[in-house]
Image (spheres, rainbow, N blue to C red):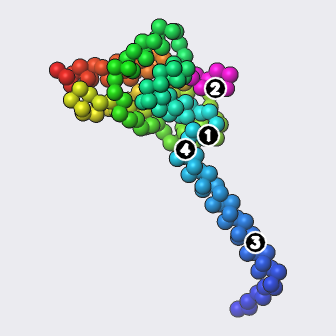
Amino acid sequence: MSEQIRTPEQIERRAGIVAVLSTIGIMVFLAALLAYTYPEFLPAAPEKTVRLFLRAEDGETWFNVQCSLRGPTRVREEYILAASRADLAGYRVTDSVLKRIRWALGRVGETETLKVTQYYRGADQRLLPVTVTYVLLRERGEWYIDAESILDGGYEQFLSRRGRADA
């Protein structure tokens, strides 16, 4: 059982390597935590577009909502009319974590989808969950939401559920 004797230089070098690797690990962890907590600071990704869109809708800034939508003017106006009649209470991204990690790494196509459960307040103040599949289109590096996909998927579901809940 022979023990290796280390010189003070070797000890210092090893301590330096450990310090550098620990610092890199902490920085990577903090960057991931920041990206998860504040996705609006990430490069334009499909999820960021949907989150900003829902934040604008919740704040009833209809100009920002319209700027995020793509499709015929009639469909965008119908969407905004339907959205103004509903009370969005919150939302939760329910799509695959692996898909979201792939997006964060920059692996995206020209068309992507994102599933979101949106919660609307009904006439009796109950929360009505509606699952919406957002279809996102990339044009010149920016992401836009296909208006027809959410008009058919989200608000019509909500309004029909609200009608059943009111009856």
- Locate the C terminus and report the quarter of the image it occupies: top left
Magenta run includes residue 140: yes
Start-end of magenta stretch: 137-146
Q: Nearer the viewer, residue 26 or 135?
A: 26
Vertically, is 42 above or below 72? below
Q: Which residue is mark 4?
A: 38
Vertically, is 89 above or below 9? above
Which numbered disc covers residue 16? 3
The location of residue 6, given as percent across then percent down, is 78, 85
Which numbered disc covers residue 42? 1
The residue under label 3 is which amino acid type?
Gly
Magenta run includes residue 136: no
Vertically, is 57 above or below 94? above
SS at badge 4 = loop
The residue under label 2 is which amino acid type?
Glu
Q: Which residue is mark 2?
A: 142
